[in-house]
Amino acid sequence: MEANQAASELTEDQVLNFLVNTLDEEIDIELGENADIDSEDIWDVLVGATADEDSVSHLCEISEDSPHGNTILHHLRTKFELSELERVGKTLIQQDILELLPDRPVEVVADLHLRPYYGEEYESKDELYNSLAKAGTTTFHGYATLYARVRNKRYTLAVRRLTDGDTASSILAELLGVLDGLDLEVKAVYLDREFYDTYCLTLLAAHNYAFVMPIVKWGEKIQNELSTGWSRVIDHDLQGEIDGHTWTVDFPVYIDCTYQQGKYDEEGVARHGYAVDAPFIETPRQARKHYSRRFGIESSYRLSERSVANTTTQNPAVRFLYVLISFLLQNAWRYLHWEYVASPRRGARRLWSWRFDEFLGMVRRAAETALAVRRAVPANKPPDDRFER
């Protein structure tokens, strides 16, 4: 065997089997005794549609060995309770990934991801999340996510569906509850600016997590601080009210100043303010540097949007299932890449190139083979010489 040559290989069929087995073990589809399909048939279609950004109906239509699309959609609509799916989803997402997290403290990111919705009004308005205008709408399919950041890689620990009426504090309370339940030492939690309020700051203190988050320019005082001066640390406070009681949260704000130098067609000094409670951050520059690491989470969202089954259904359980599978694919790719593809050696492992696009291609081809997706289409006359080589 040549140096650095792998002793074995991981085939696309095995990758598909890994994904289907993972879903089948965690999510129970209770089919009747006389059902003419089994749960693996359903997972083959869902994983294949996810990897190809296809719809379940279309994939079944062009496949010879798949169940009818209406059969699968019927089971999806009737066999999943949303509350149970949200509970099982956490264990599904965390499976195998926790093995990759190191013994040392890890950085955690909490974020809100909003996917614009332009369709007609839902039967239940609670199923959509309303927020500030973005991409021409104020209505979204919203998801709160919790990530662990290790070796510049992002691992999804939890996905929570957002509905109208959710508040930043209720979302954060649930995410921190998930984090508390993990055998995980946390270095710091990096949060989006949507979590900047007295309730969330109080929650972070109660859970005793170090944190960094950008501040919002609420009030004349902080607006003045962020419009003049140079890098510095100031004391700031926010007031909140609940059940008629008012309380104040005090915290330091690290203001970092940088020259724009034409970035985003802007000139002059840009001032960034961060609410910080982390022992390893001593200067405003460190606050901005550490917080900038969370921006990699956007690439996880881009990958998710490129690997989610296409659907127009308003069923919240089905939509959430599709999103869970899209995040599962990312976690499975990172797990398999590190655990099976990377070569153990003295020091750090050798991480062989295996792009997410290539991973999706392998899953798609394996699913097409399993479902016998058509490889030819009817023609009204024989192909001529131009079709030969």
Image: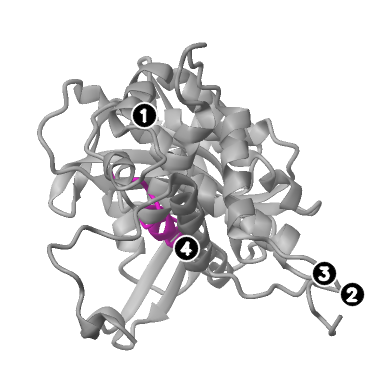
Seen from the viewer's position, the closer of residues 79 and 368 is 368
Neighbor class of circle 4 (other Cα within 10 Å; few <14, some 14-19, many 20+) is: some
Instruction: Identify the amino acid type marked 4.
Output: Gly
Q: CA distance from mark 3 to mark 1?
A: 39 Å
| Residue wearing tag 2 | 346
Q: Could you say whether the residue bearing mark 3 is in a helix, strand or loop? A: loop
In the displayed structure, 113 sits above or below 301; it is above
Query: Of residues 383 and 121, which is closer to you in this image?
Result: 383
Position of the N terminus by quadrant: bottom right
**Is 4 in front, or is 144?**
4
Q: Is residue 265 above or below residue 102?
A: below
Q: Residue at x 48, y 53 (%)?
A: 369
The amino acid beneath tag 3 is Ala
Start-end of magenta stretch:
296-310
Report whether residue 81 is seen: no
SS at mark 2? Answer: loop
- Was residue 210 drawn as part of the magenta stretch in this picture? no
Residue furthest out toward the right: 346
Q: Amino acid at mark 1?
A: Ile
Which residue is labeled 4 in the image?
Answer: 361
Name the secondary structure under disc 4.
Answer: helix
Q: Name the N-terminal-most of marks 3 and 2.
A: 3
Q: Earlier in the sequence, mark 2 or mark 4?
A: 2
Q: Which residue is mark 3?
A: 7
User: Could you give the CA–CA distance between mark 3 and mark 2, rounded to whole angstroms?
Assistant: 17 Å
Say how many tags the image has. Answer: 4
Majority SS type along the magenta span? helix
Mark found first going from the N terminus, 2 or 1? 1
Q: Which residue is painted at 12% across and 52% down in the image?
A: 136
